[in-house]
Image (cartoon, rainbow, N blue to C red):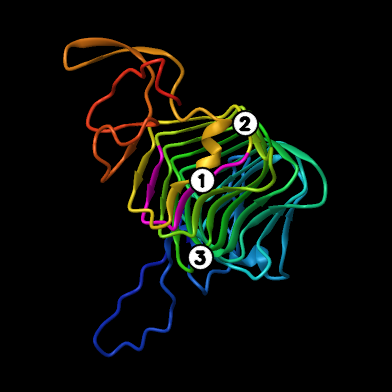
């Protein structure tokens, strides 16, 4: 009999004892436990591999869903409810990721999740979405985004077989910040002439991709990003005609001097003065006569 995880009747093992009793493992996770799955009392839904035994796990209720181990499922998770949080808890979903089901959804949060699959997050018709501190090992697309008020922050996208870090079907009033894009076909890709509008892309790193940024749409702000060693291009040139590759006017101090101007992007390997869209070794104000 076990009380609070401890056998209440001790027994002695000597060198001649053939011990056939299982060890009492912490959290009842030993394979011989008679208690089955752990029952938590924190109001959250805790997911293990057992929840995917029949394939696709469909979220139909508002709540917080927490992974308790790496998940290897060919079907993954489908979200069919508003007001859902998925906390990866530092674990990976392998083979298949997370997608919205067949409706329109809002207030979706996904955080602390690793995704090692063809399509990590496929969030169609989803508004008010927050994705943070996730890791994507990309073979096709890390995130497919389609909605308004989407915030993607502090995520890492690494290409395993090229692929796109973020593929934007449509995004209005969104933010992509503090992310790293490496070894991808395209770091951030947009589809359609007005796929993205009134969004801010800032403090990201685009390093050793084929394309850093393929941007369609208008009235987007792109600044304080780092572009380095992207073999084909840092971004598509025509995007500079309808978007702002600099910040709004700011007042800031650098090296004891107060500046009023705009902050651009950093292009590693370019000589100071070869670009009018970025900053290099230090910030500078953009002269009104210089096109931007």
Mark 2 vs mark 3: give the one in front.
Answer: 2
Dividing the image into 4 quarters, which one contains the C terminus? Answer: top left
The residue labelled by disc 2 is: 218
Secondary structure of the residue carrying tag 3 is loop
Farthest residue in the left direction? 255
Q: Residues within 10 Å of mark 2 (few under 14, many from 20)?
A: some
Q: Is residue 188 above or below residue 1?
A: above
Residue occupying the point 27% across, 90% down: 16
Residue 126, how many percent across, how many down?
72, 40
Label drawn at residue 1:
3
Foreground: 26 or 139?
Answer: 139
Magenta stretch in the rendered image? 204-216
- Magenta stretch: residue 186 in it? no
Mark 3 neighbour class, 10 Å CA radius: few under 14, some 14 to 19, many 20 or more: few
Q: Give the spatial CA distance, label 2 vs label 1.
A: 13 Å
Q: Which is more N-terminal, label 3 or label 1?
A: 3
Closest to the observer, 91 or 124: 124
Query: What residue do we see at 68% from left, 41% from top?
Result: 193
Whether residue 279 sits left or right of residue 33 in the image: it is: left
Q: Which residue is mark 1?
A: 236
Q: Position of residue 288 (x, y in %)?
A: 41, 15
């Amino acid at each position: 009999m076990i009380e609070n995880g401890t056998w209440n009747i001790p027994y002695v093992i000597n060198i001649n004892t053939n011990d056939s009793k299982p060890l009492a493992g912490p959290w009842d996770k030993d394979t011989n436990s008679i208690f089955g799955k752990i029952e938590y009392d924190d109001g959250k839904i805790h997911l293990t591999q057992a929840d995917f035994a029949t394939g696709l796990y469909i979220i139909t209720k508002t709540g917080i869903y927490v992974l308790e181990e790496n998940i290897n499922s060919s079907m993954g998770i489908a979200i069919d409810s508003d007001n859902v949080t998925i906390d990866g808890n530092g674990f990976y979903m392998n083979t298949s990721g997370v997608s919205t089901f067949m409706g329109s959804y809002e207030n979706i949060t996904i955080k602390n999740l690793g995704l090692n699959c063809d399509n990590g997050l496929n969030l169609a018709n989803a508004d008010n979405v927050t994705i943070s501190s996730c890791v994507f090992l990309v073979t096709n697309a890390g995130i497919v985004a389609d909605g308004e008020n989407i915030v993607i922050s502090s995520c890492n996208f690494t290409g395993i077989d090229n692929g796109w870090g973020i593929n934007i079907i449509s995004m209005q009033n969104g933010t992509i910040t503090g992310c790293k894009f490496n070894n991808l076909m395209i770091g951030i890709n947009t589809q359609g002439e007005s796929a993205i509008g009134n969004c801010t892309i800032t403090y990201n790193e685009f390093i050793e991709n084929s394309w850093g940024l393929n941007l369609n749409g208008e009235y987007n702000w792109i600044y304080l990003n780092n572009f380095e060693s992207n073999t084909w291009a840092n971004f598509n040139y025509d995007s500079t005609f309808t978007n702002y590759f600099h910040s709004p006017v700011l007042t800031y101090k650098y090296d004891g001097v107060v500046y009023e101007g705009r902050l651009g992007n950093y292009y590693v390997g370019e000589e100071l003065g070869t670009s009018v869209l970025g900053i290099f070794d230090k910030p500078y104000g953009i002269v009104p006569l210089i096109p931007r």
